[in-house]
Image (cartoon, rainbow, N blue to C red):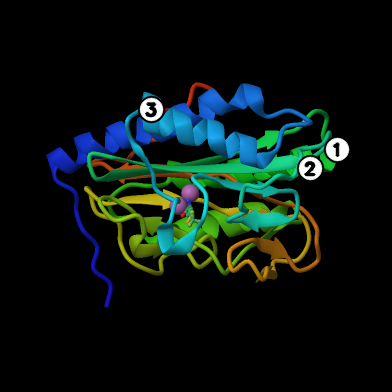
Amino acid sequence: MTTVTLKTAKDILGMRIAGKLAADVLEMIAEYVKPGITTGALDHICHDYIVNVQQAIPAPLNYKGFPKSICTSINHVVCHGIPSNKLLKDGDTLNIDITVIKDSYHGDTSRMFHVGNVPIWAERLSQIAQECMYKAIKIVKPGCCLGDIGEVIQSHAEKNGFSVVREFCGHGIGKVFHEDPQVLHYGCAGSGMELKAGMTFTIEPMINQGKAGTRVLSDGWTAITKDRKLSAQWEHTLLVTDTGYEIFTLRTDDTISRISE
Ligand code: MF3
Ligand code: CO
Ligand code: CO
């Protein structure tokens, strides 16, 4: 059974704050993403900022045993990369995924970073993945259904010669990190649950340069592409409003409006 919670006005205020804090962490960390820094150092900087400056909680830390405060997924890592002593090098692509808890509410967001100069095809994959997320957000309104979101993402990715990861999806979010509904990034328009005002969920497509298949490493977390080709992901947390959407995790570098026109 799927149980989708509709958020109250109070919940929405809380999620707006948590979302803004998560977005702020991605803005704060940008200047540190350079060749020669370790993902562990990025984790430390984010952890300290979330705990000491934002007085919030990094949701990943100890979540189902996850050992760090952020996820750092380099090149062919699809998601859930664990920060370590690995050095970033020129040409790497990196996803940083931040989830903060503030006053019990979660804000969840991720973006791609280019480490130094990345090849043109890597830049294109990141860009198409972001377009997939934006195209999906733009159709969100009451009456739209989850299958519409999946189809928009899948068709844009595949039209550009890329593939959509099936094993991980977006999710409802609120006082719970991952709740119903599951937001698949592939599917058929007209199918699936109908969206209602007050729903809050993430859209977080993982788009692969090669085949869609993934596998999880023996650390139990790190998901990689089976063919070792690149993967890219972007994520926002949003609300279904009476007339469209509101993005809780918008940053200044986003090229979509916070609220649907
Ligand atoms: N932030 C991820 C998501 O978008 C989940 C990370 S779970 C963790 O849903 F344990 F790996 F942190
Ligand atoms: Co998420
Ligand atoms: Co996330």
Q: Earlier in the sequence, mark 3 or mark 1?
A: 3
At label 1, the amino acid type is Pro
156, 26: nearer the viewer: 26
Q: CA distance from mark 1 to mark 2?
A: 5 Å
Q: Secondary structure at mark 3?
A: helix
Quadrant in the rendering for residue 167:
bottom right
Q: Are marks 1 and 2 in contact (CB under 8 Å)?
A: yes
Q: Which residue bears the numbered disc 3?
A: 52
Q: CA distance from mark 3 to mark 2?
A: 35 Å
Q: Residue at x 75, y 32 (%)?
A: 115
Q: Secondary structure at mark 1?
A: loop
Mark drawn on residue 119: 1
Q: Position of residue 62 (x, y in %)?
A: 43, 56
Residue furthest to the bottom: 1
| Figure quadrant of the N terminus | bottom left
At label 3, the amino acid type is Asn
Q: Earlier in the sequence, mark 3 or mark 2?
A: 3
Q: Position of residue 205 (x, y in %)?
A: 56, 53
Mark drawn on residue 122: 2
Task: Say above or below: 42 vs 205.
Answer: above
- Disc 3 or disc 2, which is closer to the eye? 3
Q: Position of residue 238 (x, y in %)?
A: 36, 43
Task: Decide if residue 59 is on the left or right side of residue 36.
Answer: left
At label 2, the amino acid type is Ala
Tell me if mark 3 has few (under 14), some (14-19) or many (20+) residues whose alpha carbon lies within 10 angstroms of its own. Answer: few
Q: Residue at x 82, y 35 (%)?
A: 118
Mark drawn on residue 93: none
Task: Decide if residue 143 is on the left or right side of residue 128.
Answer: left
175, 135: nearer the viewer: 175
- Disc 3 or disc 1, which is closer to the eye? 3
Q: Are marks 3 and 2 in contact (CB under 8 Å)?
A: no
Task: Say above or below: 214 vs 25.
Answer: below
